[in-house]
Image: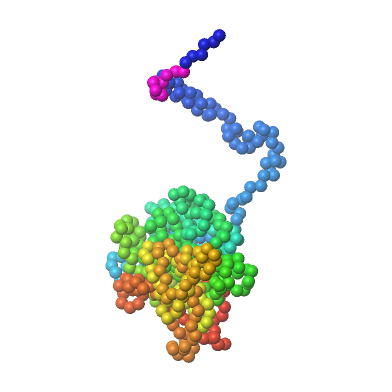
Amino acid sequence: MSQIKPARNHRNGQFSRRDVLKLGGGLLGALAGSVALPKALLKPEGVAAAAGVKSAAKASIQRPVYDEVIPNKHLAGTDGWIHLPGDPRPPYFPDNMTPDPLFNTYIFGYHDVSGVAPQDLIKFKMKAQLAAPVLILEELEPYYLKLTNLGLQLRPDLIDAHTVHFHGFRNAIPIFDGEPHSSVGVPIIRDLTYYYMPRDPGTYMYHCHFEETEHVHMGMIGPAFIRPALNKTLAPRKFVYNDESTEYNREFYLCLSEVWLEAHWADSHIQLPEWSDYKPEFYLINGRAYPDTIVGNGYRDATGEMVGPAGREDLANQPVTSLITTNEFDQVLLRVNNLGFETVTMTLAGIKMRVIARDAVQLKGRNEEDLSFMTSSITLGSGESTDVIFEAPAYQGVNGVGQPDKYLFYSRNLAPLNNAGWAGKGGQMTEVHVFPRNDSITLPDQTEPNT
């Protein structure tokens, strides 16, 4: 009869030197055995062949080809230059590194390269746009956004990745969330196609989430919104949410941001700003400061290059106007988001606004009761959005026959209403122009926002 040996006592769970040597020898043997394995066993094709799987079965497996997806929008991340109005403030403004005196402030940003051939993408290095191109999605329709990182022409020493973070998008898949600490960033000369299935209508925004304090402030920001399915059901009427009470006639998005001149100068001069000293001098709407906010739109030509408004080529990289134009009695939608670091209060003087949503959530109670409210001012913290609708007042003709009535939409804070201390009005201010309803002056229907 065999004798059962008692369990070895490892000194209260401790290993002896002999035990450690034995364990190490076993691990070395296992490692040597794994190296000696035929490489074919490490390949799926070899495993399939060893199992007798026919080659026809392999051909029958249909895998999606990721690169064949045609994106709804293709953005390139890079650097560039913009124009801001104001008197010189040496040494930071105008920036003496500018390659063209039309431009005076260095930025990071995105550029729309949709439809551009791969071999031509590098031509758009140093052509960043502020604010970035708007993303317009439709509820329950897949949306593909491709991001290519072209690198920074003025700062080749910075090998930063870029991402697109769809700020506020519910239940984002981590790989498509654009938050690189738990996902991935896009290295230089690489690209990634993001996939979204939009389910929640409303006003959002997007930004780069790599070194976000720097990249967001430097200009990698843009507006985004999701249109409701109700628009198709009741076309050609337009709604903000799947609720007929949110119907509107004209639509404008207003992206608020700031410029701290020292930070922009430091990035162009290979310096590091002290972010705890943050004190912006310029406050922008859609990348412009008043009075440039009311200059007309630029446009993207057939080659993908940006062209400035007539007579204002210095605004080529800031192509979107903030001028709000409407006919009397129209319902006007303002999609306002704040991608600056400071809290902003915006006032529409002389016209009441109805706040219908905040952060892409319609203001309704648990029993679907309407919680929208009337106000003359809205306050937005950093990263917040607000949807408001106002009814354009009756035309008064106070500025002369054929001239629109004018109202101001502006920040109530004193600092944002000047351009780096420059005399006169500036900063986060734009105008509402109300036209009469008659055959000669009435504005045509909008074909896209901010027109």
Answer left or right for 444 relative to 126.
right
Dominant secondary structure (helix, strand or loop) of the stretch shown in magenta: loop
Residue 70's image quarter?
bottom right
Please report the bounds of the magenta region as a residue range: 7-17
Magenta segment includes 115: no
Q: Is any part of residue 125 visible from this angle?
A: no
Q: Position of residue 29 (x, y in %)?
A: 50, 24
Q: Residue at x 55, y 72 (%)?
A: 245
Q: Residue at x 47, y 15 (%)?
A: 6
- The single residue placed furthest to the bottom in the displayed view is 401
- The single residue placed furthest to the top in the displayed view is 1
Answer left or right for 46 relative to 263.
right
Q: Position of residue 103 (x, y in %)?
A: 39, 69
| Front-most of residues 403 and 247 | 247
Answer left or right for 39 relative to 151.
right
| Front-most of residues 231 and 316 | 231
User: Looking at the picture, does residue 54 appear above or below residue 135?
Assistant: above
Instruction: Name the image quarter holding the N terminus.
Output: top right
Q: How was this image coloured?
A: rainbow
- The single residue placed furthest to the left in the displayed view is 90
Q: Residue at x 37, y 62 (%)?
A: 341
Magenta segment includes 13: yes
| Front-most of residues 80 and 352 | 352
Q: Position of residue 181 (x, y in %)?
A: 44, 49
User: Looking at the picture, does residue 391 appear above or below residue 178?
Assistant: below
Q: Position of residue 304 (x, y in %)?
A: 52, 66
| Front-most of residues 330 and 194 | 330
- Total labels: the figure holds 0
Q: Is any part of residue 328 visible from this angle?
A: yes
Q: Residue at x 40, y 64 (%)?
A: 381
Residue 233's image quarter?
bottom right
